[in-house]
Every structure is written in C-alpha cells, then in structure tokens.
Image (cartoon, helix red, strand yellow):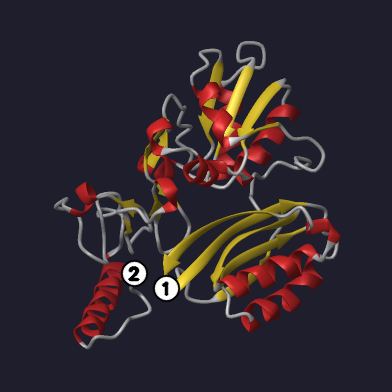
Amino acid sequence: MNIVVAALYHFSHLDNYQDLRKPLQSFCSEQKIKGTLLLAEEGINGTIAGSREGIDAVLEYLRQDTRLSQLSYKESYTEGYPFYRMKVKLKKEIVPLGVEGVSPTKKVGTYVKPKEWNQLLLDPEVVVIDTRNDYEVRVGTFKNAQNPETERFRDFPGYIKGNLDQKEHKKVAMFCTGGIRCEKASSFMLEEGFEEVYHLQGGILKYLEEVPEEESLWEGECFVFDQRVTVLHGLKEGEHVLCFGCRSPLSNEDIHSPHYKEGISCPYCYNQVSEDKKKRLAERQKQIELAKSRGEEHIGQRPR
C-alpha cells in the first residue's frame, strides 16, 4: 500500500487551541490517518500518514481555519504506515525553544528557497548552522555547516550566546529537517540583535526533493521522526535503523559494532542502558522474532 507522509507546520496565534484537539483527533481517525500533531497557542506541527484522499482531506480540514490557511507541508511516500496510531497533543510550544516572547509571527529571518541555498553555503562570509540535535547531525548535514552539538533544541540559545557575536558574525544561515526549528531560531537570533539571518525554506526535506543530487551539497542521510528513520535524495528511504535502547539512528557500521545487540543496545548506549531495561528489551526482541517466524508483524517491528 502506497502511503503519503506529510510533515506539516504553521506558526499562528491559536487562542483556542485546546478546543481544536478532539475534533481534529476524530477527523483524522475517520480518515484512517496515523501520526502525531502538536497544537499550541503558537500554532501546529507534526507528521501524519495515510492515503492520498485521507491526507488531502485533513489538509483541507485544517485550512478551513483561516489562521491555518497558509499551512506549510512536505510530502514523501512509503510502503505501509510509518506510525502505529494517531495522536493529537496539546503543548506549550510546537517546537520547544524555552525562550519567552520568541515568535516567527512577530519577527522572522529571510527565507531562502532550496535552489538558492547552495549560494549561501559557498559564501565565506556566511556562518551556516545546523539547528538540529547531535544525533541528527551525525547521520548527515550540509557541507561547511557548524554542528552546535546540542542534545535538544532548548540548548540552541546557549550555543548562540557562547559562540557567535552580532558584531563579528554579520551573516548567519540556518537549516533543519522541515523548516520549523530554524524558523523559530531565526526569530530568536533577530531578537538577540543579529541583523542578516537566513533560513532554508522547507528545510532539508524540501532541498532533497528539489535539488538534483549531482548539484547537492548535502552529505549523508536525513533523519526523520518516523519509522523510516532516514531519507535520501528524492526522499527515498535511507539505510539507517533505530536502536530500541536509546532511539539513536544507526548506520551499517554501527550495526556491525561489537556493542550492538539487535533490539537492545548500540554503540551509543551499551554502557548506559540498565540491566532491567536490557532484560525488557531482550524479551521484546524475542517476541518480535517469534512473530517473524509465524509470518506475523509485531508492533515493535519497523514497517517496510
């Protein structure tokens, strides 16, 4: 079954966002949609998957609200659902930066279209920053980009304050998976006094979709927050898998490490996972293998 995967977000003031949750949950369920959507006063964010008709219906449903009429989304395709269920959650922020008053609805950097992005990457006067977390950057990033080595997005403001200076770094360009994190990061940096702030419109996913591989300055694969784990140019499914112990993306090299145990641990967590958790994961892996031997699919399996 060919499934459409739609990564969507929009910053907009939703003063009644709590009231939107139940109707949206019900509508998505009626359309047999699976995934996760986050609602907050600052807008909506998430990734959903389903049939062509189902995804179109949900997008139309959301855009009927004039506050979400300019909703941004990117599509890719996969065989089978990359999610197990549908969840609509209420949050304080749709992307948690943890800095009060920062909002792309008030102030935002300059959008750069994917086909114009390479010019910034090759400009020696531009500081290019990957706003994603360390495990995402490890899988792939743009040539010449700085890695802040953050464990979570909330660490980003501290990195900027400790490593960049408004007077010295005149031009700053940022990127993230789908565009939402760098959009909010650009708002933060403008508030901090940086004058020329750029960000990749549509994120890495839009770049991999639109820029031919032979012209690309992207190196590696792009981590995505669903069971595909990573995607390549053309948004084809990548080669990485997830560690059930720590949820880190694993390369083929990682899987061949002596510290890798399928379904239990990997080189990034083998000495951090408790013995109790290892036992639980080992039992889970055993059930997955038993399901495979019977020709069944266990809920813990990665869909293919």
Q: Which residue is mark 1?
A: 80
Earlier in the chain: of badge 1 and badge 2, it is 1
Number of numbered callouts drawn: 2
Identify the residue shown where x is 39% and y is 48%: 232
Q: Which mark is residue 220?
A: none
Q: Are marks 1 and 2 in contact (CB under 8 Å)?
A: yes
Q: Nearer the viewer, residue 6 or 86?
A: 6
Q: Position of residue 125 (x, y in %)?
A: 56, 13
Q: Position of residue 168 (x, y in %)?
A: 61, 11
Q: Nearer the viewer, residue 259 or 139?
A: 139
Q: Is residue 159 above or below residue 152?
A: above
Q: Is residue 143 above or below residue 276?
A: above
Q: Which mark is residue 304?
A: 2
> Hey, what amino acid is under mark 1?
Gly
Identify the residue shown where x is 48% and y is 32%: 148
Q: CA distance from mark 1 to mark 2?
A: 7 Å
Which quadrant holds the N terminus? bottom left
> Hey, what amino acid is under mark 2?
Arg
Which quadrant holds the C terminus? bottom left
Identify the residue shown where x is 42% and y is 40%: 137
Q: Is residue 272 above or below residue 227?
A: above
